[in-house]
Amino acid sequence: MEKLTTGMSGAETIFLYLGILLFVVLITLLIIFVVQKREIKSLLIFFLIPILMIGWPTISSFKLSADGIELSKKGIQEAIDNPVKKEQLAELTDSLNKQHITNPDSLKLLAQANALLGDTLLAARNVEQVLEKEPNNTEALKLKRIYFTPNVVIQKGIEDVKANPADVKAKQDLSAALKKEENKIGSHQVDPLNMAAANLLLKDTITSNKYLEAAVIANPELQNVSNAKRIMKARYSVKKK
């Protein structure tokens, strides 16, 4: 059985337990007031405090500062055309990415913030976390269709295999993603360097070189296959083992 505090930060755990303790104290006082036939209206207002403390981990809006941007749909929208707000959003998002956020609503907001800031891969991972908890979450499924582009899926597969080279399923998933996109080079849906890196990671040097050649044709600035391979290895940190 999963612990009540699983996935919560230290501050969230403290808030939860203090909220529960305060709630129990207030319930005890309420019983005493009722038994003594005392006025209870003044006591009821204090129940809002433990309720907020217990519900803190589910709050899906975070503030950078009193004057800063709020991680909410409105705050993200404001950051689109406002450089100052966008910079504040980047600072807040960077901080939240380092935390163990588990609330689905918060993760969806974080996904949208990461996508706006250019990290679609991280946005896709945020959405994936939501769908692991709520497979039928309508908004998360919509975001998945937006963020899980062919390039992101392949890049995610590369990172998964690099993180755990012995994971057979991760390799199979990456191989399946490559097969699905293998005939789409030139359609602007997939990056040839991305495909080359994935194939090299799966030890298919021949296919990797084929995509490196395609990359040079698509982008003459790469100059030649050798230079494209160097850039590909630096960008994706992969090498044939």
Image (cartoon, rainbow, N blue to C red):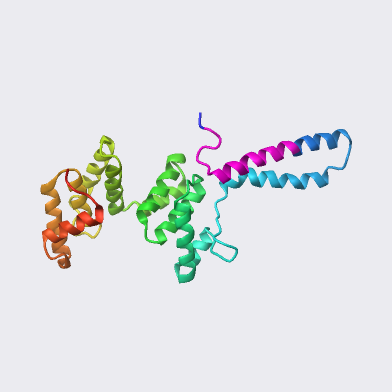
Residue 11 on the magenta segment: yes
> Residue 119 occupies which quadrant of the picture?
bottom left
Q: Nearer the viewer, residue 137 or 13?
A: 13
In the displayed structure, does residue 23 sit left or right of residue 104? right
Q: Quadrant of the C terminus?
A: top left
Q: Where's residue 60, x and y in %?
A: 55, 51
Residue 221 on the magenta segment: no
Please state the extent of the stretch shown in magenta in the rendering. 3-25
Q: Where's residue 180, x and y in %?
A: 23, 46
* Residue that appears at 55% across and 37% down: 5
Q: Where's residue 210, x and y in %?
A: 12, 53
Is residue 117 depicted above or below 26 in this figure?
below
Q: Where's residue 169, x and y in %?
A: 28, 36
In the displayed structure, does residue 236 sit left or right of residue 131? left
Q: Nearer the viewer, residue 183 or 127?
A: 127
* Residue that appears at 14% across and 58% down: 214
Whether residue 193 is visible to the viewer of this picture, yes or no, is no
* Residue that appears at 53% across and 63% down: 69
- Count of numbered tags: 0
Whether residue 163 is visible to the viewer of this picture, yes or no, is yes
Q: Residue furthest right?
A: 37
In the displayed structure, does residue 209 sit left or right of residue 60? left
Magenta residues, dominant SS class: helix
> Residue 170 occupies which quadrant of the picture?
top left
